[in-house]
Amino acid sequence: MNFDDLKNEWNAEKEVGTSISADMLKIKQAHTPIDIIRRKMKHEFFYQAIALLIMALFPYLFNFSDKMKLVYLVFYAITCGFTTYYFFKFYRFYKNSYDMSMDSRKSILWFFYEMKLNIELYKALTYIIAFIATGFLSVYLLIEKTSVMNKILANLSPVYILLNCFISILIIGAITELWAWYYYGKYLKRVKKVVDELDYE
């Protein structure tokens, strides 16, 4: 082997080393948004647990009748059931994210898709809770405020009621999408950018 061959081999090894270092740098760049998402997940868990505890006090804070306390308990149990399922999925993903190897594109890609799925579950839970709350409010008005409801329904057309329901769903949907983007989505986009750069190379 002559001197030129040795020089070419050395340059090739140097280029490989530089490429690996660049990839490692990009992987390290993904750590920051992943750490932010983990921290936000931890906060979210506590916020929702506190919200459920406060919701348990609603019948006493708003002086519900005995009949309404029972109705509320049914709706509250349904809400807790859906939330517990979400908490379980949420917590399992959170714990598994600490077990993954953070030095490979594959691990970062796993985090990206799992977190994306958790965001969809998060949004679905928000819609479910919103519909449960709407259902409870309707039952409350029908049981506790029958005379008031009769007057309201007598003065409103079915088209107006349907239009209000449609607008309410749109507002709930917009708030849910914006909150999910603000709280998690923008950081997840940064993770995806790193994955795409690694994939491109």
Image (cartoon, rainbow, N blue to C red):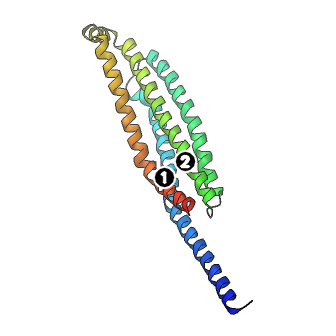
Q: Position of residue 59 (x, y in %)?
A: 43, 25
Residue closest to the eye, 134 or 120: 120
Query: Which of marks 1 and 2 precedes in the sequence?
Result: 2
Q: Residue furthest left?
A: 155
Tell me where residue 159 sits by quadrant: top left
Q: How far across and how far down the image is residue 55, in percent?
A: 45, 32
- Across the whole image, how many numbered discs are drawn on residues? 2
- As measured in the structure, the alpha-carbon distance from the residue carrying label 2 to the one carrying label 1 is 8 Å
Q: What element carries label 1?
A: helix
Residue, disc 1: 188
Residue holding disc 2: 115
The kind of secondary structure element at disc 2 is: helix
Q: Identify which amino acid the numbered label 1 is placed on.
A: Leu
Q: Which mark is residue 105?
A: none
- Please state the horizontal and vertical placement of residue 24, each as a whole percent of the image: 58, 69
User: Does the residue at mark 2 contact the one at mark 1 (Cβ under 8 Å)?
Assistant: yes
Q: Taking 131 as reference, is 83 left or right?
A: right
Residue drawn at (31%, 21%), measured in percent from left and top? 164
Q: Give amino acid for label 2.
A: Met
Quadrant assignment for the N terminus:
bottom right
Relative to 153, residue 104 above or below = below
Q: Name the residue: 41% across, 38% down.
A: 176
Check the picture and name the quadrant holding the C terminus.
Answer: bottom right
Which residue occupies the extreme bottom position in the image?
3
Report the front residue among 156 and 26: 26
Q: Residue at x 52, y 50 (%)?
A: 42
